[in-house]
Amino acid sequence: MSDIQIWTLVFVGVTFALYIYVAYASRVSDTSGFYVAGGGIPAPANGAAIAADWMSAASFISMAGLIALAYNGYSGSAYLMGWTGGYVLLAMLLAPYLRKFGKYTVPDFVGDRYNETARLIAVICAIVVSLTYVVGQMAGVGVVFSRFLEVDTTVGVLIGMAIVFFYAVLGGMKGITWTQVCQYTVLIIAYLIPAVAISTKLTDIPLPQVGWGQILDELQGLQADLGFGDYTAALTGSGQMNMFLLTATLMFGTAGLPHVIVRFYTAKNVRAARYSALWALFFIALLYTTAPTVAAFSKFNILSASSDGNLADQSWFDTWASAGLITNLDATGAPTDLNGNGAIDFQGAAGSNEVLINNDILVLASPEIGGLPAPIVGLVAAGGLAAALSTASGLLLVISSSVANDVYHKRINKAASEKQQLLVARISMGVAVVVAGWLGIDPPGFAGQVVALAFGLGAASFFPILVLGIFWKKCTAAGAAAGMAAGIVVTMAYFVWTLPSDSAWFFLGKDPILDIAPVGFGFIGMLLNFVVTIVVSQFTRKPSETMQHLVEEVRYPGRTDLVARHAEGEPLA
């Protein structure tokens, strides 16, 4: 067993034991604790949990790879701008008002604000969005285990499923929240230590956000020598349009993600929800300002080795190639040995003597690429797992609470006891874990791409009806239901039409319409949702006068009698 495997087992074993202990110590026996942790999480801890929920495998594992490899620097900033801007949009525009409205889940808000038909459609949307998102997390778990423990990807996914099942089912939101606080600590330490070490090694500047500026000119020169485009060049034509659509999709999708929104219900009150948002922004910024530096440093090291003709001699190259995450191609697209010139294709097209590098490996491989010792490599592996599992648990809770609260309790058995609701929640979470793991074994793309699709579905389904539900008191139930259905169906249909068909999934691989990339189509679906909701609302029955007054009062400071009675569950006329 190699030193890297030993250190990976040490860090993974210790952190997994910590997660299980925290979940056991935080176990719950009531629905309030299971759904929203009893609404009593302090703002700093809630901010850390939000950040861990937020920074999934896509942020930790994929984002630097997207910036460096798939989108070539400048255009990869769409992910940074979209995800960060979307968080600010959520924190300022939606979260405080949804917290004041006082419901457990997004479908719960939809059901109270509109009607039961809209609630049911919202449940379906929540399950589709969350399952799509969690597939990306399970794919990330498989990547980590397949490389660092040298086990089959399927085995890696099964291990991740078992851990998530234990602490999510046992502790519900309370256990998940405190586990995510631990997971954030692990992932941010694992991300920052190698970034600081590599920055110091390459530039003598320990602050990577400053140090990476020292290598950009050299990186530009290496790109030119190997025939690549400018690392920081702006896009034009359809590339520019798709960058805008992707940024907008990620931004509005972020503000419509149910597993992030529910986090603000775990705060003690509206004021605590606002402070939670502030803490979360600080915790998120630590990683998001570091990701571009990891991308630049890693690509610089790879291109340096490639230009010297010794890329294939690097120890990390063989280990990742053995895991199936680096592939050599000849002119026909068939695997071949890399010859001395070390030519690399970072875009994924087959050609002469090209090396295809999976976007998901860049951060995980960065310590090895930078020549750092085995303990840091093992720490990064534990950080990647923490990022994937923390988000997966939050997504699975959305699925289970939607089924148990919004379907079983609100529609099937309104007299259900706390014990019955918890049983249904735990069973549905178990089923969701199995389905997510099964789908994660053969995902339709790399982790970041799958997550981007989930954001598109979130933008197309939830964002419009949440905004209109808060800021337009005459938005009707029929309008909301029609808008959600139109948005998610059209967006999903576009995914099916355009995504590549070279997997076990049902995609068709057809040409995009007007060159619109599928990862950016969620913005179009969102606009359709807005139009349908507004038009249908003009011709359908308006909400009751009481509901219209409640919508107005939710937006103003203070806790009025009407808002208080609604938050406490009193039926309103």
Image (cartoon, rainbow, N blue to C red):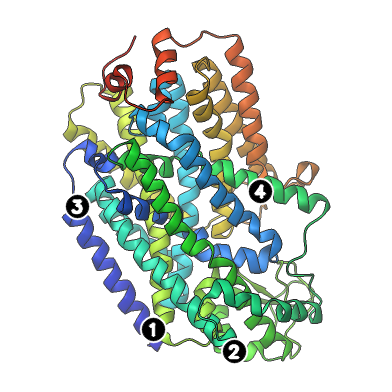
What residue is rendered at 82% in x and 54% in y? Answer: 236
Nearest-to-viewer mark from 2 and 4: 4
* Residue neighbourhood size for the residue with mark 4, other residues' Cα within 10 Å, grouped as few (<14), some (14–19), many (≥20): many
* Location of residue 155 with respect to 520 vertically, above or below: below
Earlier-in-chain disc, 1 versus 3: 3
* Residue closest to the eye, 97 or 418: 97
* Location of residue 237 with respect to 91 vertically, above or below: below
Nearest-to-viewer mark from 2 and 3: 3
What residue is shown with label 1?
Answer: 375
* Kind of residue at disc 3: Ser
Q: CA distance from mark 1 to mark 3?
A: 30 Å
**Residue 557 coordinates in the image, percent (x, y):** 38, 28
Q: Are marks 2 and 3 in contact (CB under 8 Å)?
A: no
Quarter of the image for the N terminus: give it.
bottom left
* Kind of residue at disc 4: Leu
SS at mark 3 in the image = loop
